[in-house]
Image (spheres, rainbow, N blue to C red):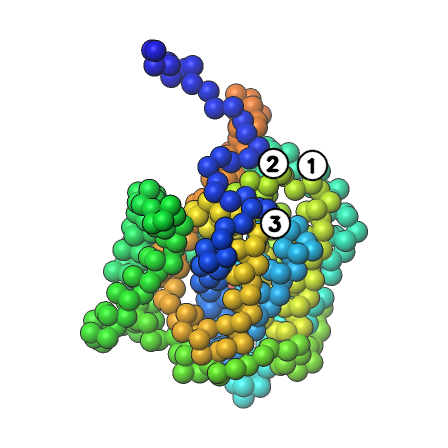
Amino acid sequence: MAEPKPEEISHPPMDQLQGLEYCIDSNPSWGEAIALGFQHYILALGTAVMIPSFLVPLMGGTDDDKVRVVQTLLFVEGINTLLQTLFGTRLPTVIGGSYAFMVPIISIIHDTTLLSIEDNHMRFLYTMRAVQGALIVASSIQIILGYSQMWAICTRFFSPLGMIPVIALVGFGLFDRGFPVVGRCIEIGIPMLILFIAFSQYLKNFHTKQLPILERFALIISITVIWAYAHLLTASGAYKHRPELTQLNCRTDKANLISSAPWIKIPYPLQWGAPTFDAGHAFGMMAAVLVSLIESTGSYKAAARLASATPPPAHILSRGIGWQGIGILLDGLFGTLTGSTVSVENVGLLGSTRVGSRRVIQISAGFMIFFSILGKFGALFASIPFTIFAAVYCVLFGIVASVGLSFMQFTNMNSMRNLFIIGVAMFLGLSVPEYYREYTAKALHGPAHTRAVWVS
């Protein structure tokens, strides 16, 4: 039979991706599910450690404070993930910390009233309480929009054409968390990137007892190998006389988490004291909540596609946003130092492993809660260098972005209007944040600089 001509080959639009091993309601064996859940937990550690490691020193906090914040963030992440998978959208999504909240939090940290506190520990506590108060107030945005079904009305206007840039930019918009961080320690980042791609794509047909072990567990295997390699470099003194920044990004003993972590510690609400409330802080945090709202909506759509689930109806998305608002409220009550959103990297891992099982994500939530209470064990895994996570992000953020681009199959790409909408939305979605980033880096304040703290 003659080979079909290229113009005769067609790929009809399909609502669900093909080739997934387990969809949202089908579960692997318990042993495999536990291993996959642990893999999602390890991936979630990247953001859970990176955000407090950056913010706590700015607040005057010590290594002990940083460890407590990391433990608290992981504990609340586990609770929020369980709530979302049981009562929210019920999609296989990990609810983690969000970088979108860092700008208003840094603004609170630089509040002159807080900076005037001379004692570093007291400044840390008062800043934490101010962040908690802002999160508690701002959480009402998502709670009201979600449970009133107002967000359901909005999402009905999200056509496939509109979802292309929304989902794609969820992945592409995090490009600064990828290779720029890998470049801080090339000798660890590049091998990690190559190994992860090799295991997940080129050696995926290697089977052990009919299980594609290298594809399914590419993340945990490659992290183990490169982490051991990084520890070998550290122990051999390869970074002994290198600059402090290089040591911070490459050494495996610079996080100071294991020595500072308690053996057992259960986070509890209001552990930092009673939250304080300020209108300026709350308004800034509300802007981050709206960003998280859009980001999470795109991530839910991507997760549904990667889990081979039916596209979530408007009322389900709205319910999920309501529960996410409850999650941000818990962040404020416990003091996690950031708000909640869907973890984009964990959504990407659904595609990399081809396992979209809800049970796997719920098991990962169990690991988060368990290891956040057993501090020493959790701190051991949390001491993985950020460069290793950044190499994985290069792949997983790209997968999420490509899911957004896959919605093009449901649109008429021969229409000039559709091309205009997608092109302009994608370009401005990358260009405008870059403008704000460059302006803020030079001027140390945003473009709208007024006497109103909540605007500037």
Q: Are marks 2 and 1 in contact (CB under 8 Å)?
A: yes
Q: Residue furthest top?
A: 2
Q: Quadrant of residue 222?
A: bottom left
Q: Earlier in the sequence, mark 2 or mark 1?
A: 1
Question: Which residue type does callout 2 highlight?
Answer: Gly
Mark 3, Cα crowd under 10 Å, few <14 / some 14-19 / many 20+, is many
| Residue 157, numbered label | 1
370 over 318 or under it: above or below: below
| Residue 91, numbered label | 3
Q: Quadrant of residue 122?
A: bottom right
| Residue 45, numbered label | none
User: Could one spot residue 407 in this view of the protein?
Assistant: yes
Alpha carbon distance from label 3 to label 1: 21 Å
399 over 72 or under it: above or below: above
- At x 23%, y 69%, the residue is 233
Residue carrying label 2: 162
Where residue 164 sits: x, y (%)? 55, 37
Question: Which residue type does callout 3 highlight?
Answer: Leu
Alpha carbon distance from label 3 to label 2: 21 Å
| Element carrying mark 3 | loop
Q: Are marks 3 and 1 in contact (CB under 8 Å)?
A: no
Where residue 45 sits: x, y (%)? 46, 65
Q: Which of pointers 3 and 1 indicates the residue nearer the eye? A: 3
Q: Which of pointers 3 and 2 indicates the residue nearer the eye? A: 3
